[in-house]
Amino acid sequence: MQITRSGNWKIPSSRPLQVSAAAAGSSLDLVREPVQAAILLQHPLRLKILAALLEPDSATGVARRMKLPRQTVNYHVRQLARARLLARAGRRRRRHLFEQCYVATARGYVLSPELLGKLAADPAKVADTFSAKYLLGLASKLQSELARSAELAAAAGKRLATLSINSELRFASPEQRATFTQELQRAIVEVAARHSSPFTKTDGSEAEGRPFRLVVGCYPIPPAKDADSQPQTAGNEGGAS
């Protein structure tokens, strides 16, 4: 089980969290602006060029590696830089010329649900709260709210207090899974009652303290993607939501 937290959310752990050097140096960026998303997705080459520039290189160098015309790659590089998805990474001399190098602004990107406007997934619009669609709606809501909170914290020069728990489980039977669900729900309710304050007052108004959202979800882990395999249909997945 992996537990991570940030800000002033301190939880004692009996087992130190091990983070690889590669993961520690990586970063994630959220694409929230429609123009930025449009530039990124407008042409399939741009995703490939952005991936090729996870390490600094010039448009000429990328064109050489991808075996594409330099003019084509240079055009897409300029568009990605205009969208602030590429940053200048110095210049290098090649023969008698200097090449401008670029590097991706992050190691990975997330498209914000806010890009869809009113069409963004909303768990409140899903009647079946036990469905996978409801869980997807919660994930979308989490992503939108977390992005806004992170942006406000960054503007204030503060680190956002967050907590995440990631674990992989196996259930041998539906009965075992149902028992786990009941016990987990009971434990969460008891811990929340003991260690948090009421979210609202008796009259429905906001209570004191900073509001937080706790989301707990569990779903079957899909099989690893295989380029040679055919996608599975809902009827042969062998799992339940």
Image (cartoon, helix red, strand yellow):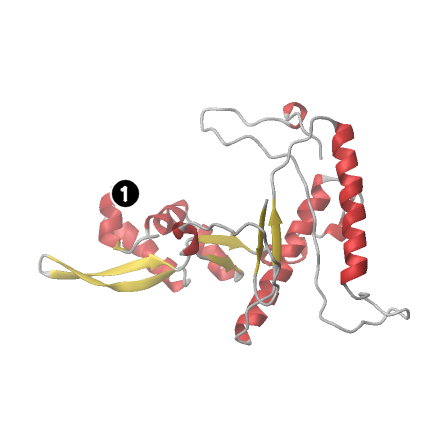
Residue 112, image x, y percentages? 57, 56
Which element carries disc 1, helix, strand or loop? helix
Residue 141, image x, y percentages? 67, 55
On screen, residue 100 versus residue 106, left or right, reads left
Read off the residue under disc 1.
66
Q: Residue furthest right?
A: 203
- Please tell me which residue lies in front, 14 or 83: 14
Q: Residue at x 22, y 45 (%)?
A: 64
Residue 36, image x, y percentages? 47, 60
- Please tell me which residue lies in front, 18 or 231: 18
On screen, residue 97 versus residue 83, left or right, reads left
- Please tell me which residue lies in front, 236 or 168: 168
Asked if one can make out residue 117 in the rendered structure from this viewpoint, the answer is: yes
On screen, residue 56 versus residue 106, left or right, reads left
Q: Residue at x 54, y 74 (%)?
A: 155
**Badge 1: how crowded within 10 Å, few (<14), some, or many (20+)?**
some
Q: Amino acid at mark 1?
A: Met
- Please tell me which residue lies in front, 63 or 105: 105
Asked if one can make out residue 130 in the rendered structure from this viewpoint, the answer is: no
Quarter of the N terminus within the rendering: top right
